[in-house]
Image (spheres, rainbow, N blue to C red):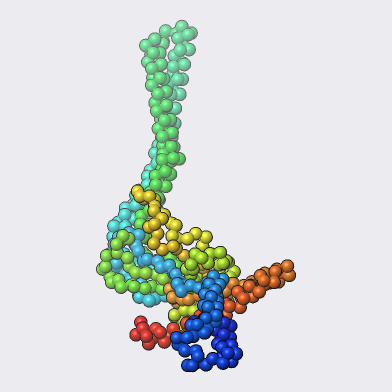
Amino acid sequence: MLEAILCSLVSLLPDYLFRRYGQGKRIGHEITLFSMWYELRWGLTIWLMLTISLITVLFYYHPASLTVNSYFRTVTILPQVSGRVSEIHVSNNQIVSAGDRLIELDGLSQRASLDAARAQLVETEVSATIAETDLALAEAGVAQARAALTQSQEELERNETLRDQGSSAVRLTEIERLENLVDQRQAQLQAAELQQQSAQQQIDQVIPAKLESARAQVALAQAELDKTVIVAGIDGQIEQFGLQIGDFISPLARPAGILVPTESGRNRFQAAFSQIAAQVIHTGMVGEMGCMSKPLDIIPMVVTQVQDVIPAGQIRPTDRLADPQDNVRPGSVLTYLEPLYPGEASRVPPGSSCIVMLYTDNHAKLEDETLPIGRKIFLHVVDTIGVVHAAGLRLRMLFMPVQQLVFSGGH
């Protein structure tokens, strides 16, 4: 409407003034409802062409989006294990901090597993003390076997010396018995030494491994017990929380509620623009935004990021080939915007529905002295007609409360 009014001032109005004062034709006489299409044919034709051209240039170089939202992420309050609620530490709409306890489950089986793991650890620690005693006993056995072997060897050497001297006090059977005794006691010494090595290995390798395994079992059981306590992972507000003590919750199908992070979705907005504006929109482009949740306020915005892919081309591997004809909608250019001045959008709740207008700025190009005069005039026109968008946004925001509260029945 504004575009049509502006274009009529330079096309339709001069044509009428010429007809009225130059040719003396009057409305209601020479110019009627049936003759004005002929009398004002030049003005009407130029007005229509200018209006279409102005709207085309305006919406191309100053793109607008009616689908602007501040998306925010919610965290589902879910337990890691299934169980029955035994304690509740929060209520609905309560503000919580990271690490605060929310819910506790009964955890009967987890506590039993922890007690069993601790008992196994104590048993393993006691076995370490017993292993020390076994080592001392094995060392004593080695010393006893070595002493017995030494005694047998000395007796054998003494009898062999007497035999070599030709003494008749020595019998060959006695020497054979002593040789067998020495062999027997050498085997006993080796067995005692092996027993000592086994006891030492128990202390050096087996017992430490059992202790580590028992401590790991205790840690695992403690971790399973800790899973029965649900804590907040981030600062936020509890929503849709209606648990009661005795309720059964599960990580698969029975969530406890929703935690809305404090900073999620604030001061960052996502706008969808037509693909035809993809070559115009760029990072650093400024604009203005108005939101339904904050009517009558215009918030200066700046483009911080432009998504370099269009969602309409996304595919997922299936057993069917993708057909481009299945894409009903062409897809939009997703743009991320933030307030130009900090704190301007602090009162806009996440999830608000907004309108945004972006403005092309050719000030840097116009400073180029080598730019042709025709190009300069065109760029000046492009920058100037951005005022129409600014006025249109303000009119929308002015009539939004009336439209929503009166003509929409307050919905």
Residue 184 appears at what percent x and percent y?
38, 21
Residue 48 appears at what percent x and percent y?
52, 77
Q: Residue furthest right?
A: 369
Question: In the picture shown, does residue 235 fall above or below 317?
Answer: below
Residue 405 appears at what percent x and percent y?
38, 86
Question: In the picture shown, does residue 393 fall above or below 109?
Answer: below
Left or right relative to 105: residue 31: right
Left or right relative to 189: residue 27: right
Residue 301 appears at what percent x and percent y?
55, 74
Residue 71 lies in quadrant: bottom left
Q: Residue at x 53, y 75 (%)?
A: 49
Does the rendering let one see residue 325?
yes
Q: Residue at x 32, y 69 (%)?
A: 87
In which quadrant of the rendered image does the C terminus lie?
bottom left
Left or right relative to 402: residue 88: left
Does the rendering let one see residue 270?
no
Question: In the picture shown, does residue 260 fall above or below 290?
Answer: above
